[in-house]
Image (spheres, grey):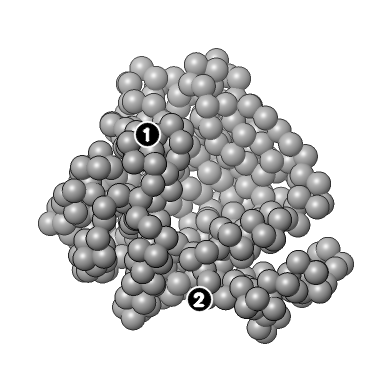
Amino acid sequence: MARSVYIHIPFCKSICSYCDFCKVFYVKKWADRYLEELYNEITDRYEGELIKTLYIGGGSPSQLNEHDLEKLEKIINLFQFTEDYEFTFEANINDLNDIYLTRLKNMKVNRLSIGIESFDEKKLKLMGRDADFDQASKIIKIARSKGFDNINIDMIYGLPNESLNTLKEDVKKVLKLKPDHISFYSLIFEPNTKLFLHYKKGVSQDEEYEMYSYIKRTLSKAGYEHYEISNYAKNGKYAKHNLVYWNNDEYYGFGLGAAGYLHEVRYENTRSISKYLDGNYMYKRELVSIEDEKKNKLMLGLRLTKGVNLNEWFLKYGDNLEADENIQKLIKEKLLKVENNYLFINPKKLYVMNEILIRII
Ligand code: SF4
């Protein structure tokens, strides 16, 4: 039973050079029709379960104006929520102000995920983004005064020619903002992005490891728990919605290009805005075999620093994961470890997680 919902708002003001998310420029007429179709899609597919986590992502949901937010609120009112629900709204720092934050609070948003990515001028220019530390500091202060006590900040590292010193400055500044959660992503060069076409790759693997280790060390020292390869939380404020993905639980995905996992079927919506606006939402559906489900559970679970619970695995699938020949090999090579009934990636080897996961499958 799905207890989580992802809603995609694809509109952006400008296009960042590294981005391969599903997005289009904000056009008022499209936004209007899009929100109507979103309403239709959800009334068609939502089965009425109590929802524990709702994540509105994009794109840039904060591109929606007051009129659009009224429509979005009607959509949100379609759902029934549990008392301890988490409702995350993704926003670009430059879109936020006092009025907008009050509006979000009134919509019952209780977690903000703010895209900043860097404070360094060169990095921002390369990414095609804009951010200013003083402005960010002011906005976070306003958000706190409105009662937002769960704020995430997204950051990126590993850009071409980025130095460790530049990264250190970014880490220092993001810590000064005292967010409850920090997502620090190593830049992925996606084909067909402007950045990929110009640079192909960012820093070397050694530099990336040095940066990753610095982030991990410094954030841990500042009281953040490193609980997923790129994610850090203070006071147990984990991203509950993202934990649904990492635990391989089912969830609804609504909107352009959204993916979902329901009744053992993984599906993806169309990325074509014209098809979506015509009500042709679905792009593909795939029944997940038990073997694929196990593979997904392992690959996603190993992203978490605590790893995969071996007892739960045995109860669910009836086999001893630790005894698997491939897993045994990786344990012997000290790439995987087992402790307190959890199988996890050796923390010293997390930076080569992708290579380890490839070897597992
Ligand atoms: S990174 Fe975010 S804001 Fe930038 S183009 Fe992509 S979806 Fe839009």
Residue 264, image x, y percentages:
76, 45
Q: Residue at x 51, y 49 (%)?
A: 54
Which of the labelled discs sits on residue 197, or is there none?
Answer: 1
Q: Residue at x 53, y 32 (%)?
A: 257
Which is nearer the N-term, disc 2 or disc 1? 1
Q: Which residue of the protein is positioned furthest toward the right in this rendering?
A: 318
Compared with residue 1, is residue 229 higher up or lower down, i.e. above or below? below
* Total tally of numbered discs in the picture: 2
Residue 98 shows up from this direction:
no
Identify which amino acid the numbered label 1 is placed on: Leu
Residue 326, image x, y percentages:
76, 66
Please name the residue that numbered disc 2 is placed on.
348
Residue 298, image x, y percentages:
68, 61
Compared with residue 342, is residue 166 higher up or lower down, i.e. above or below? above
Identify which amino acid the numbered label 2 is placed on: Lys
Name the foreground residue: 137 vs 198: 198
| SS under mark 2 | helix
